[in-house]
Image (cartoon, rainbow, N blue to C red):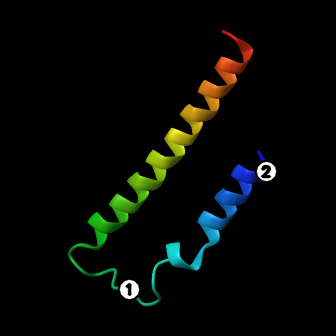
Protein backbone atom coordinates (compact mmCIF):
# COMPACT_ATOMS: atom_id res chain seq x y z
CA UNK A 1 0.00 0.00 0.00
CA UNK A 2 2.85 2.37 0.82
CA UNK A 3 4.31 1.73 -2.62
CA UNK A 4 1.08 2.85 -4.29
CA UNK A 5 0.87 5.94 -2.11
CA UNK A 6 4.46 6.86 -2.96
CA UNK A 7 3.75 6.41 -6.68
CA UNK A 8 0.69 8.63 -6.40
CA UNK A 9 2.61 11.39 -4.61
CA UNK A 10 5.43 11.25 -7.15
CA UNK A 11 2.96 11.40 -10.06
CA UNK A 12 1.00 14.31 -8.60
CA UNK A 13 3.95 16.46 -7.64
CA UNK A 14 6.32 15.65 -10.47
CA UNK A 15 7.58 18.73 -12.29
CA UNK A 16 7.20 16.84 -15.57
CA UNK A 17 3.44 16.51 -15.05
CA UNK A 18 2.95 20.22 -14.37
CA UNK A 19 2.16 22.68 -17.15
CA UNK A 20 4.92 24.98 -18.31
CA UNK A 21 4.71 28.50 -16.90
CA UNK A 22 2.84 31.07 -18.93
CA UNK A 23 0.74 28.86 -21.17
CA UNK A 24 -1.98 30.70 -23.08
CA UNK A 25 -5.52 30.25 -21.72
CA UNK A 26 -7.00 32.37 -24.52
CA UNK A 27 -5.90 30.03 -27.32
CA UNK A 28 -8.76 28.28 -29.16
CA UNK A 29 -7.54 24.81 -28.14
CA UNK A 30 -7.08 25.65 -24.45
CA UNK A 31 -10.50 24.44 -23.31
CA UNK A 32 -10.16 21.17 -25.24
CA UNK A 33 -6.69 20.58 -23.84
CA UNK A 34 -7.81 21.18 -20.25
CA UNK A 35 -10.84 18.92 -20.76
CA UNK A 36 -8.60 16.15 -22.11
CA UNK A 37 -6.34 16.47 -19.07
CA UNK A 38 -9.29 16.37 -16.65
CA UNK A 39 -10.82 13.34 -18.38
CA UNK A 40 -7.53 11.44 -18.37
CA UNK A 41 -7.01 12.12 -14.65
CA UNK A 42 -10.60 11.01 -13.93
CA UNK A 43 -10.07 7.89 -16.03
CA UNK A 44 -6.90 6.89 -14.23
CA UNK A 45 -8.57 7.52 -10.85
CA UNK A 46 -11.53 5.37 -11.93
CA UNK A 47 -9.26 2.51 -12.94
CA UNK A 48 -7.47 2.76 -9.60
CA UNK A 49 -10.74 2.59 -7.67
CA UNK A 50 -11.90 -0.35 -9.80
CA UNK A 51 -8.68 -2.28 -9.21
CA UNK A 52 -8.78 -1.54 -5.47
CA UNK A 53 -12.39 -2.74 -5.17
CA UNK A 54 -11.72 -5.82 -7.30
CA UNK A 55 -8.72 -6.83 -5.18
CA UNK A 56 -10.71 -6.27 -2.01
CA UNK A 57 -13.60 -8.34 -3.41
CA UNK A 58 -11.32 -11.21 -4.40
CA UNK A 59 -9.55 -11.14 -1.05
CA UNK A 60 -12.80 -11.50 0.91
CA UNK A 61 -14.04 -14.27 -1.41
CA UNK A 62 -17.36 -12.70 -2.32
Q: State the image quarter where residue 28 is shown.
A: bottom left
For this view, does 55 lie left or right of residue 30? right
Residue 23's tag is: 1
Tell me the residue that label 2 is attached to.
Answer: 2
Secondary structure of the residue carrying tag 1 is loop
For this view, does 21 lie left or right of residue 51? left
For this view, does 56 lie left or right of residue 46? right
How much space separates mark 2 and mark 1, taking CA atoms? Answer: 34 Å
Q: State the image quarter where residue 34 is shown.
A: bottom left
Residue 59: percent from left, percent from top: 72, 20
Residue 57: percent from left, percent from top: 65, 19
Residue 55: percent from left, percent from top: 65, 27
Q: State the image quarter where residue 24 is shown.
A: bottom left
Identity of the residue drawn at 69% across and 11% down: 61
For this view, does 38 lie left or right of residue 33? right
Identity of the residue drawn at 50% across and 40% down: 46
Q: Residue furthest top?
A: 62
Residue 39: percent from left, percent from top: 39, 52
Residue 57's tag is: none
Q: Residue furthest left?
A: 28
Give the foreground label among 2 and 1.
Answer: 2
Other-residue count near label 1 (Cα within 10 Å), few / some / many at <14 / 14–19 / ≥20? few
| CB atoms of marks 2 and 1 within 8 Å | no
Compared to residue 59, the image places residue 27 above or below, namely: below
Quadrant into which the N terminus falls: top right
> Viewer-proximal residue, 1 or 13?
1
Secondary structure of the residue carrying tag 2 is helix
Quadrant into which the C terminus falls: top right
Amino acid sequence: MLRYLAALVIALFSTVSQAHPGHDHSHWSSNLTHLALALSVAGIASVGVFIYRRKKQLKTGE
